[in-house]
């Protein structure tokens, strides 16, 4: 085993980053997501032969994230890689520099999970590829949210837009990044709860009318066909057509209906909730994002609600090595 390890243990340490993501894209609950060009989490890792796993965290919202290696998403994902390749005798020394704000709906734990899994895999000489690596990264999401969902961590790993076509076994279809588009993100300063994703899942209906299933299927069809054909108008209609998840979660987000109506009236292609919220997002044409964001932000300001606004691109690249 030692001689085999010598061949694959190619670096003493590595520093990688993984991007924020938007999950669901309206009607695609748990099965589709897109990577943003920024912000990104950075994870620095080395592997040691003794001493136990150690995690340090700094950056945006770091005070709210556990340093316990058994609870931290990046460490759990990295440990899953070690176990999968039979190197659970090694220990992680991991530093996480948060750029993706926790509890924002922008895939904070997904970015950390992707970076944690990828960095350890890279140190071992890349024994895992594709869905095998994704499955390890999903364990980080399980630790963070209680559910090993892939709609954030898959685009964080692979970039572009990723559709999860199967869960058992996990399979994905990747689309190239959307071009000539801007993604406006508005994040209201509201507190959904300590376990935000869990609350946002619990609020969902246990059953829905058949007609809503038909409308939801139609909306997801528009989204997927729009992606395949490069038809941003059709894709936007799909994003805006969620009648199940969005309807339930909108009550957690102040002025949601007003925000959506204003965005679509202003010419946005589509508008919906980013992941579990409270961030919302609009897909719009180039050079429109800054003004649209200011208009949407003003709706919240009129109600005395503080918010942040940012304009992004759909990132072609997911996790990557950084200097």
Image: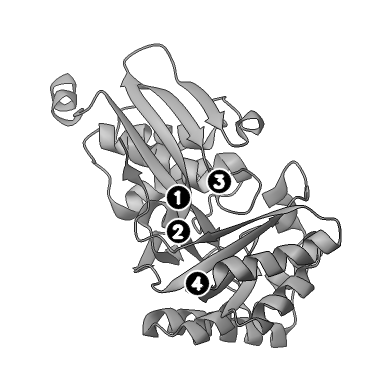
Distance CA(mark 1)–CA(mark 4): 22 Å
Query: Going 78% across and 47% down the picture, which residue do you hit?
Result: 191
Question: Dot 3 corresponds to which residue?
Answer: 108
Label whose residue precedes the other's in the sequence (2 or 1): 1
Q: Secondary structure at mark 3?
A: helix
Label whose residue precedes the other's in the sequence (4 or 3): 3
Label whose residue precedes the other's in the sequence (2 or 4): 2
Distance CA(mark 2)–CA(mark 1): 6 Å
Label whose residue precedes the other's in the sequence (1 or 4): 1
Distance CA(mark 2)–CA(mark 4): 20 Å
Give residue 35's mark: 2
Question: Dot 1 corresponds to which residue?
Answer: 19
User: Foreground residue, 287 or 308?
Assistant: 287
Where residue 123 sits in the image (x, y, percent)? 27, 32
Label whose residue precedes the other's in the sequence (1 or 3): 1
Q: Secondary structure at mark 1?
A: strand
């Amino acid at each position: 085993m030692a001689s085999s390890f010598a061949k694959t243990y190619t670096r003493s340490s590595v520093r990688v980053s993984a991007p924020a993501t938007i999950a669901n894209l309206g009607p695609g609950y748990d099965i589709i997501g897109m990577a943003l060009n920024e912000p990104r989490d950075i994870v620095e890792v080395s592997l040691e032969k003794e001493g136990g796993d150690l995690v340090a965290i700094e950056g945006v919202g770091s005070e709210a994230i556990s340093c316990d290696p058994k609870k931290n998403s990046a460490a759990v994902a990295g440990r899953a890689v070690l176990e999968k390749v039979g190197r659970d005798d090694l220990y992680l020394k991991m530093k996480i520099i948060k750029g993706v704000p926790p509890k924002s709906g922008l895939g904070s734990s997904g970015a950390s999970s992707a970076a944690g899994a990828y960095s350890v895999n890279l140190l071992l000489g890349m024994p895992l590829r594709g869905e095998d690596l994704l499955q390890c990264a999903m364990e980080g999401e399980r630790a963070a949210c209680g559910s090993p969902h892939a709609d954030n961590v898959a685009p964080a790993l692979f970039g572009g837009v990723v559709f999860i076509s199967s869960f058992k076994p996990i399979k994905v279809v990747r689309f190239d990044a959307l071009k000539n588009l801007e993604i406006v993100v508005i994040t209201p300063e509201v507190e959904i709860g300590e376990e935000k994703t869990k609350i946002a899942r619990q609020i969902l209906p246990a059953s829905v009318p058949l007609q809503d299933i038909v409308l939801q299927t139609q909306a997801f069809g528009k989204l997927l066909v729009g992606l395949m054909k490069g038809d941003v108008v059709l894709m936007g209609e799909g994003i805006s057509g969620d009648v199940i998840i969005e309807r339930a979660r909108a009550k957690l987000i102040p002025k949601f209906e007003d925000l959506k109506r204003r965005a679509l009236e202003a010419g946005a292609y589509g508008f919906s909730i980013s992941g579990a919220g409270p961030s919302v997002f609009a897909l719009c044409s180039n050079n429109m994002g800054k003004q649209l964001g200011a208009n949407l932000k003003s709706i919240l300001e009129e109600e005395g609600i503080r918010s942040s606004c940012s304009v992004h691109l759909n990132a072609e690249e997911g996790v990557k090595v950084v200097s």
